[in-house]
Structures are given as structure tokens and as C-alpha cells.
Image (cartoon, rainbow, N blue to C red):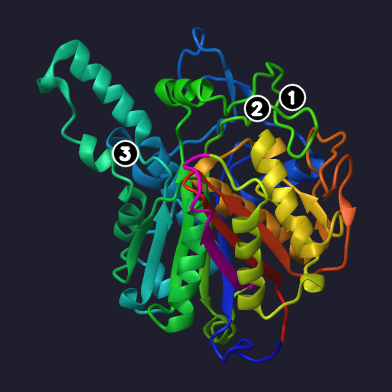
């Protein structure tokens, strides 16, 4: 591929900024180092008293201080999910501009990007919104009555809060869209942002997902439905694609990318992290929580993303898989990948052995990891993976060196949602 347009004559979509707040750290470098080390980040829950719960471990974001980003008063008026998202988005914008930090960056963001604020958009989402705040306020209502419900509850719990707050903080008056599709939210947000850039709706879009639902009712609900692992050992609990997998580890976090046309990124001398080459999205249209056992919806989604990118299966270097560590989802995903690429024909990794399952943030955090891997030609190992009967070549034990090539990043969700992103390494052509 050469020039400023892709195989369909559309503007190429460059990734010029990345930011993340994850259980593996507060920066992209910290996330990458933890993935390379295969170091599981699960631990005892500290965000609430989990002593009465059957599952008492999760992957929490350590040492996150939102005050530098919004100030102490706004911290009290904003749900943790939105604070994580706003901080990650601010870091991504600062990365795209250079010479500043996310905590320092304010309403001058568009000027730093050399774009009219009306031409700079936001696509941000969360699977469950401000659930932690909602749970707390329901308790306040039950214990102390309606007059004790916070006047800030509605803006704190609404699923579009992060998208709105990113626009408000940075003065971005262009298209502003909230996405909420459970565990595909982050990937959907990035894909829809790429559409905006391609069709000219916006010149620059900051896009990603955020989640913080390590909360009493949420943890109880996922435990009751049998989705969470029963393994009490935090270091070994999340086991993507492994024969001993029995459920996922709940996590929290956020990640955002800044997307813009390749042409303008080059013109303004931006550092280009990579390229969004393809986007596919389908629905199983079968069961509200269980995936199609044969992976048919996921397969169609992957094939759509490859076609959108103008690539053949052999052009993909590896798969950054959804890989939740649940019996049904890992099996369905493996079946889909085997049908597209051939059984065990392509290296596969899942970061959820390290980070746990970040729900609405999973797809965007994994897109960041996929871009770094694509550029460095190194595939991180899948933590806690020992053996599998599934038809996939899981990278485990040590990182694997490969030639830099496009990476497929997959995301699947309750509701039957399927998303695939094809992300390419940075090139000069």
C-alpha cells in the first residue's frame, strides 16, 4: 500500500496517539512490559469488602490518581470508569500532540492537533457505565431515603459520560458518540471512529473504551451466572485457551487511540504508531450470553475485517485474541480462527492472562497491545497457558519473534456482538 489512500480509495487511517490505564500499569510502556513478562496482575479485591463473596480476586488498576487530570472536586462528582477513561483519552491526545502530558492538556488539544475543534470527534464507551456509583446510591436510598441520593447520580452513571467529559475537557466540538456493546465496546468505538475518518465526518477522532465494575453487585452477578473463575490463586486464575480454564477474572481499565487521516498526520509531522486497516462487525443472533458454538458469527466478522483491509489470511502475522479464559468463548473463537486461517496456522495470544477481562475496555487495551506488537515484531506470551486441545497455536512461556506484519485483534460480547480490527505497523509508504 502506498500514498494517502487505501485499496478502496478511502483515506488511510493513522494511529498517532495511545493512552491506557490498566491493571498492568498507567502507561503503554508499563502495559507492554507486563505483557512481555506474562505477569498476571490479579489480586485480592480492594475496591470493596469482598469477604462474603465466592470470588474475591480481580484485576484492579493500581496507584491511579485522577486528581491531576480533573481536580479533587470533580473526582467526587465523577464515576471511576469515567475518570479512567478521561485520563487514558487525555494521555492519548497528549501523545498525539507531543510536548505535553495528559494531566496538563486542556482545551488547547485541537490547536495542538492542528485541527478545527468541529472536525475533531470522540467515540467513547463503557459496557455498564457508572455501575459502581449506581450501586452505592441505591444503598444510600435504601438506608437513608430519597433525600440522600446524590444530585450527581445521573451524570455519574450514564454510559455516555466519558464521551461527554473528553469533549468538555478538551474543547472538542465535533462528532461525539457513545458506544455500549458489552465486551466489544472498545473495539466498536475504534472501528466507528475509523469510519468517521474515512468518510470525512471528522479529521481526527479520539476513540476507546473504559470500565470499572469491580463492585459488589456486579461481581455477585457474574459469579452467580458462572462466568468468573473459581480458581482462588490470583497468579494462575486467568488461563486463556488453556484446558484448565474455568472462567474469567474481572478487571477494570481504559485505553484510547487517536485516529486521523494518514495524509494530515504526515503533513503535521506526527509520530505514527500504526494504521487501522480493517474493521468487521457482526452478530451471532443466537443467544444473549452464549456464543455460536461453531464460531460462525466470529468467522464472518474476521472475514469482513480482512476484506475491509484488502488482505488475505496469509497477510496476517498473528492474532491478539479475545481469549477470555471461559470454556465456551475460547472454544468458539478457536473454531472461528481455525476456519479462517487453518488449524493452528497462525500464532495467537491473549492479554487477559495478565490483565483479566476489562469488559468494555478490553478491545481498546488489546488494540494498543496489538499495535505495539505489530511494530516490534514480538508477540507477548499468554500468561498461565500450559496446554490446549483447541486448534490454535497459542504463544506461551516466552515472547515469540515474528516479522512485522498486520495483526488481527478480536472482541466478542454478550448479545452476540463480534468485532475484528486489523491493525498495521507504522510504515513510511
Q: CA distance from mark 2 to mark 1?
A: 6 Å
Q: Which residue is mark 3?
A: 78
Quadrant (top left/top right/bottom left/bottom right) for the C terminus:
bottom right
Residue 249 position in % (x across, y down)? 61, 30
| Sequence-earlier tag: 3 or 1 | 3
Which numbered disc, 3 or 1, marks the residue closer to the eye?
Answer: 1
Instruction: Specify whether residue 199 is painted magenta.
Output: no
Residue 325, visible in the rendered structure = no
- Residues in magenta, as a range: 272-289
Mark 3 touches mark 1? (CB < 8 Å): no
Q: Which residue is mark 1?
A: 235
Residue 193 position in % (x across, y down)? 46, 68
Q: Which disc, if any, is residue 42?
A: 2
Mark 3 touches mark 2? (CB < 8 Å): no
Q: CA distance from mark 3 to mark 1?
A: 32 Å
Where residue 140 sits, quadrant-wise, is top left
Between 206 and 409, the residue placed more toward the observer is 409
Instruction: Specify whether residue 277 is painted magenta.
Output: yes
Q: Residues within 10 Å of mark 1 (few under 14, many from 20)?
A: some
Residue 409, visible in the rendered structure = yes
Residue name at image x 74 percent, y 51 percent: 335
Is disc 3 placed on a helix, strand or loop?
A: loop
Between 16 and 48, the residue placed more toward the observer is 48
Which numbered disc, 3 or 2, marks the residue closer to the eye?
Answer: 2
Q: CA distance from mark 3 to mark 2?
A: 25 Å
In the displayed image of the protein, which residue is found farthest to the left? 147
Residue name at image x 10 percent, y 21 percent: 147
Residue name at image x 35 percent, y 37 percent: 130
Mark 2 touches mark 1? (CB < 8 Å): yes
From the viewer's perspective, is 250 left or right of 340?
A: left
Residue 277 position in % (x across, y down)? 63, 74
Between 425 and 95, the residue placed more toward the observer is 425
Amino acid at each position: 500500500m502506498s500514498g494517502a489512500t487505501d485499496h478502496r480509495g478511502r483515506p488511510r487511517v493513522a494511529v498517532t496517539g495511545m493512552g491506557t490505564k490498566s491493571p498492568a500499569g498507567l502507561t503503554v510502556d508499563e502495559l507492554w512490559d507486563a505483557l512481555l513478562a506474562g505477569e498476571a496482575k490479579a489480586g485480592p479485591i480492594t475496591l470493596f469488602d469482598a469477604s462474603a463473596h465466592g470470588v474475591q480476586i480481580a484485576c484492579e488498576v493500581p496507584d491511579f490518581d485522577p486528581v491531576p487530570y480533573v481536580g479533587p472536586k470533580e473526582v467526587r462528582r465523577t464515576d471511576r470508569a469515567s475518570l479512567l477513561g478521561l485520563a487514558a483519552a487525555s494521555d492519548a491526545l497528549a501523545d498525539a500532540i507531543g510536548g505535553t502530558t495528559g494531566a496538563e492538556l486542556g482545551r488547547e488539544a485541537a490547536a495542538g492537533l492542528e485541527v478545527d475543534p468541529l472536525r475533531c470527534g470522540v467515540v467513547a464507551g463503557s459496557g455498564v457505565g457508572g455501575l459502581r456509583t449506581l450501586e452505592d446510591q441505591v444503598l444510600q436510598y435504601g438506608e437513608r431515603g430519597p433525600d440522600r441520593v446524590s444530585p450527581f447520580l445521573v451524570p455519574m452513571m450514564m454510559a455516555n459520560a466519558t464521551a461527554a467529559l473528553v469533549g468538555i475537557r478538551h474543547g472538542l466540538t465535533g462528532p461525539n458518540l457513545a458506544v455500549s456493546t458489552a465486551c466489544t465496546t472498545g473495539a466498536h468505538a475504534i472501528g466507528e471512529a475509523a469510519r468517521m475518518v474515512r468518510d470525512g465526518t471528522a479529521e481526527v477522532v479520539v476513540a476507546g473504551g473504559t470500565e470499572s465494575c469491580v463492585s459488589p453487585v456486579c461481581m455477585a452477578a457474574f459469579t452467580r451466572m458462572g462466568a468468573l473463575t473459581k480458581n482462588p490463586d490470583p497468579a494462575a486464575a486467568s488461563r486463556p485457551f488453556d484446558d484448565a480454564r474455568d472462567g474469567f477474572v474481572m478487571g477494570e481499565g481504559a485505553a484510547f487511540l487517536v485516529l486521523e487521516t494518514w495524509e494530515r498526520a504526515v503533513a503535521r509531522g506526527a509520530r505514527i504508531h500504526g494504521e487501522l486497516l480493517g474493521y468487521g462487525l457482526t452478530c451471532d443472533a443466537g443467544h444473549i450470553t452464549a456464543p455460536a458454538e461453531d464460531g460462525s458469527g466470529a468467522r464472518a466478522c474476521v472475514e469482513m475485517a480482512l476484506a475491509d483491509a484488502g488482505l488475505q489470511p496469509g497477510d496476517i502475522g498473528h492474532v491478539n485474541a479475545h481469549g477470555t479464559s471461559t470454556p465456551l468463548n475460547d472454544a468458539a473463537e478457536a473454531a472461528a480462527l481455525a476456519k479462517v486461517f487453518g488449524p493452528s496456522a497462525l500464532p495467537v495470544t491473549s492479554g487477559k492472562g495478565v490483565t483479566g477481562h476489562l469488559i468494555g475496555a478490553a478491545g481498546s487495551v488489546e488494540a494498543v497491545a496489538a499495535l505495539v506488537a505489530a511494530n516490534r515484531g514480538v508477540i507477548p506470551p499468554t500468561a498461565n497457558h500450559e496446554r490446549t486441545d483447541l486448534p490454535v497455536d497459542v504463544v506461551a512461556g516466552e515472547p515469540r519473534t515474528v516479522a512485522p506484519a498486520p495483526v488481527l485483534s478480536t472482541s466478542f460480547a454478550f448479545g452476540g456482538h463480534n468485532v475484528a480490527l486489523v491493525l498495521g505497523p507504522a510504515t513510511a509508504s
